[in-house]
Image: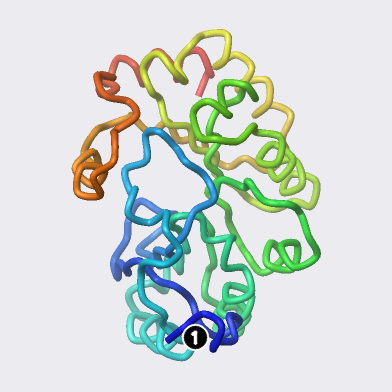
Amino acid sequence: MEKNDLDLRYYAKVHSIESFGTVDGPGIRFVLFLQGCNLQCKYCHNRDTWDINNGEYKSLDEIFERIMHYKNYIKNGGVTCTGGEPLLQFPFLIELFKKLKNKKIHTCIDTSGMVALTPQIKELIDLTDLFLLDIKHIDPNKCKDLVGFSNEKELDFARYLSDIGKSMWLRQVIIPGFTDEKEDLLKLKDFISSLKTVEKVELLPYHTMGKYKWADLKLKYELEGVRDATDDDIKRAKEILEI
C-alpha cells in the first residue's frame, strides 16, 4: 500500500512489536515500535527505524485486535508506543489511544518531544497517561551536534507536560565525553527540579550493541571509539543529579 492511498488516522507504519515489554513503562506492556524519526542521534541503537519508507503499514483494527489478544497480560501495565519517533504518526496514535482509553488501558509514549505543540499534539497528550521523555542533551549547542537539532522544543514539551499535570519519566543516555560533564548534569538537575510531574529519572548507559545496524546499512557509525558507559559512570551521574 502507498501512503497517498491511506487515511493515516487508521494506518501506521510499524517497525516491530513486542508483546511482553518490561522496560518501557510500568508493568508488563505491549510495545509498538513505529517507523520514522526526525532526529539523527549519533548514538542511536535503532538506526533502522529512521527511514519512514521502511517498515510495514498496519491498520488500526489489526493493531487494536492484537493488543486485545494480550489484554489479560497487560492489565497491570498497558501499551507503550515508541520508535523511531512515535509523535510523527500522531493522527494514528490519537485514534488508537481513544480506543485504548475506552478499554481503560494505560497509555504511554516514549518520545524525544522534539515537535511543535500543535492542537493535535495536545489532543494526543491528553489521551496519554505517561510520557517517557528522552532528554537528548541539556545544552542546546551540544544537543544539536549530538542529534541534529537544538533542544528548545523538547524542553518546552517537558514544561508543557508539567504545567498541565501530565506524568513523565525523564531519560538521559549517559555517553562518556558527551552527556556526562558535571556542568551539564548540574544544569539537568536544575531543569528537573523546575518540573512538577517527574515521577522517575532514568539514566541509560550508552552501549554499542546497535552498531551493527549502521554497518548493515553501510553507514558510518558516528561515535566510533567511544567506550560503553560503566556502572561507575552511572553512579557518578546519579550522585551529581542526586537521584
The residue lying furthest to the front in this view is 218
In this image, 234 relative to 147: left or right?
Answer: left
Residue 39 image point, x, y percent: 52, 44
132 is higher (above) or lower (below) than 178: below
Q: Quadrant of residue 144?
A: top right
Q: Position of residue 137 (x, y in %)?
A: 55, 27
Q: Which residue is mark 1?
A: 60
Q: Nearer the viewer, residue 49 or 97?
A: 49
Q: Residue at x 45, y 64 (%)?
A: 52
Q: Amino acid at mark 1?
A: Leu
Sort mark 1 into few (<14), some (14-19) or many (20+) by Cα contacts within 10 Å. Answer: some
Q: Residue at x 68, y 26 (%)?
A: 191
Say if 158 sits above or below 123 in the image. Answer: above
Say how many tags the image has: 1
Which scheme is used to colour this image of the protein? rainbow
Answer above or below: position of 37 versus 198. below
Name the residue: 42% across, 58% down: 51
Q: Is 63 on the left-hand or right-hand side of 106?
A: left
Residue 101 figure quarter: bottom right
